[in-house]
Amino acid sequence: MGSRGEVPGILSCARNADREKYFLLSEPISYAEFGFAALASREVKKINHLSDADKYKVGSIIGYTSSTELTDAGIEHDLSPTDRVALKKLEAGRIELLYSELNTTRYLVKTELEGVNLKYFLMGKRAYHLCISKQWPDAQSLLSMFNAGLAEIQADGTFDSIQRKYQ
């Protein structure tokens, strides 16, 4: 619907060449951090690359990019239907590492797994944007207004205050 201009835009999307054919992308509104989580009590050495995980029992979530990346790297991994199920497996010791989006993992541990302490190994970061349909009337003006408003709330601390609620 967004690419056809039936709606003004979509939230939130990562930059890629195909998407840029149809959308104008705002300044970054958030970042996804991808990496491994392990129980703090486990002996897990520093992980700098995906290949460093091949000596551990790794888990991921069905249908997520993280699972595809593990498969492409030739790393066997256990699949879970949701982030919550994967975290329960990590907590129970059925997996030693969970490869996922780390902001989601941190939030779920904070809100649902009281007393569980994890350590994290960042593998990469991806910016997300508001994508405004190029087919929408005055799309460039809408993008400019959004970016100006975003800059304003970033400058006065409102943006950080909102972000902290979900960390």
Image (cartoon, rainbow, N blue to C red):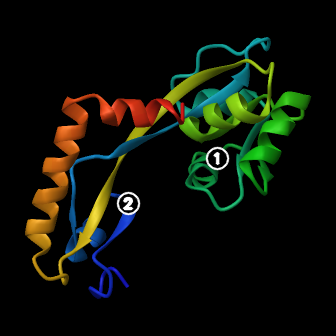
Task: Tell me: 66 left or right of 62.
Answer: left
User: Callout 1 environment at 10 Å: few (<14), some (14 to 19), or many (20+)?
Assistant: few
Which quadrant does the C terminus fall into?
A: top right
- The reply to whether residue 109 is in sight is yes
**Residue at 24%, 69% in the rendered image:** 132
- The reply to whether residue 15 is in sight is no
Residue 62 place in picture, x, y as percent: 71, 58
User: Callout 2 environment at 10 Å: few (<14), some (14 to 19), or many (20+)?
Assistant: some
Which quadrant does the N terminus fall into?
A: bottom left
Q: Which is more toward the observer, 51 or 14?
A: 14
Q: Secondary structure at mark 2?
A: strand
Q: Amino acid at mark 1?
A: Gly
Give the distance between the C-alpha atoms of the residues marked 1 and 2, in whole angstroms.
27 Å
Residue 51 place in picture, x, y as percent: 59, 33
Quarter location, residue 114: top right
**Residue at 79%, 28% in the rendered image:** 96
Residue 105 place in picture, x, y as percent: 64, 36
| Mark 1 or 2, nearer chain start | 2
For discs 1 and 2, the disc positioned in front in the rendered view: 2
Task: Tell me: 59 left or right of 132.
Answer: right
Q: Which residue is mark 1?
A: 74
Task: Tell me: 36 left or right of 131.
Answer: right
Q: Which residue is mark 2?
A: 13
Picture layout, residue 72 above or below residue 131: above
Give the label on residue 142, or none: none
Picture layout, residue 51 above or below residue 15: above
Picture layout, residue 137 above or below residue 41: below
